[in-house]
Every structure is written in C-alpha cells, then in structure tokens.
Image: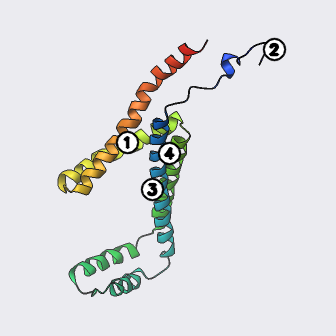
Amino acid sequence: MAAGTSSPPSHLSPQPVPPAHADAALRAIAGFEAAKGAIALLAGAGLLSVLHRNLHQLAVALIGHVGLSPGERYPALLLSQVDLWAHEDLRLLVVAVGAYAALRFTEAWGLWRGRVWGEWLGALSGGLYIPFELWHWWHHPTWLASAVVLFNAGVVAYLGWRLHTRPAQARRAAASQP
C-alpha cells in the first residue's frame, strides 16, 4: 500500500466473494464427486485383491455365506459371469477405475476451490452421463432412476448456469472497482 492511501491498489484488491450459498452448493457437489472417487478406489482395491484368486471358488463361498445354493437360478447366473471374468485380464479395468477416480478427485478439488475449469469439468463429465441415464430410465423407469436423472441434470444445469453467468459477474466486479 502506498503511503497516505487508505486502500490497496486495484490490482491487489481481493476478488469479490461469491454468495455463501454458491460456495455451499459447489462444495456439496465437490464432496459428492470426491465420494464417487473414493468408492471407485475401493472397488479398484477389491478388484486387485481378487486378481490372483480363484474367482469361481470365491463366488461359491460368498453364495453359500448368504444362504443360497449355487445351483439356483440367480446364483448360477452369477457363477457363469464370474467364470467369464476369470479368463479376462482385469488389470486394464483396474487402471480404468484408477483413471476414473483421479478424474473425480480432480473435479472435486477444482469445484472445492471454485476453479472455472472444475465447473467445466463437472458440467461436461456430468453431461456425458445424461443420455445413458435417460436411456436407462426410459427402459427401466424406477424412482431411483428418476432421482439419478434429476439429480445429475440439476448438477449439470447449476454448473452450466454458473459458467454462463460468470462473465457478467466479472464485468460487474470490474465496474465496481475504482
């Protein structure tokens, strides 16, 4: 600050603080995205733990543990799928899960810190899911499917609205500075 002045130069003045509800909404979305990343990491760790095990034997033990018979219809379907997975290389899937988790954590960090790129990442990545969610909802209309579509569309709409109004907010902030 220059001697004898009571306010800092305009280039040093703090940026306008967004309303508290905007920060709360962004942080809630960021927390949700971080939780999705953490769940993905747990799923990846679960996949890693079964990479070198007999998946069929593990599935039979799990089916027996919950009191079902491996010969019943649904347990037999599960076992046939497990037998298909046993011949696949799950390492690529583990890498994909890790990349997904990294994307979710990156988005969460950007949203938590109020970064424009975080909002773009959230709007684009969330928007990519909407056609698939709508297809699923159309073919399997349930309350849960409806809630997922509405929640995701709401998040994408909110982030899109923030991105759309950001230039006007910047112009107002610049005009209010001396």
Tell me if mark 4 has few (under 14), some (14-19) or many (20+) residues whose alpha carbon lies within 10 angstroms of its own. many
Q: Which mark is residue 5?
A: none
**Label 4 SS:** helix
Distance between the Cα atoms at labels 2 and 4?
43 Å
Residue type, mark 2 in image: Ala
For the residues labelled 2 and 4, say whether their Cβ atoms are less than 8 Å apart. no
Residue type, mark 4 in image: Glu
Q: Quadrant of the C terminus?
A: top right
Distance between the Cα atoms at labels 4 and 3?
11 Å
For image coordinates 44% across by 51% down, the residue present is 32
Residue under label 4, please give it: 107
Distance between the Cα atoms at labels 4 and 1?
13 Å
For image coordinates 79% across by 15% down, the residue present is 2
For image coordinates 25% across by 54% down, the residue present is 145
For the residues labelled 1 and 2, say whether their Cβ atoms are less than 8 Å apart. no
Tell me if mark 2 has few (under 14), some (14-19) or many (20+) residues whose alpha carbon lies within 10 angstroms of its own. few
Mark 1 / mark 2, whichever is N-terminal: 2
Which one is in front in this view, the residue at disc 1 or the one at disc 2?
2
Residue under label 1, please give it: 155
For the residues labelled 3 and 1, say whether their Cβ atoms are less than 8 Å apart. no
Residue type, mark 3 in image: Lys
Q: Is residue 132 visible?
A: no
Residue 92 placement (x, y as % from top left): 47, 62
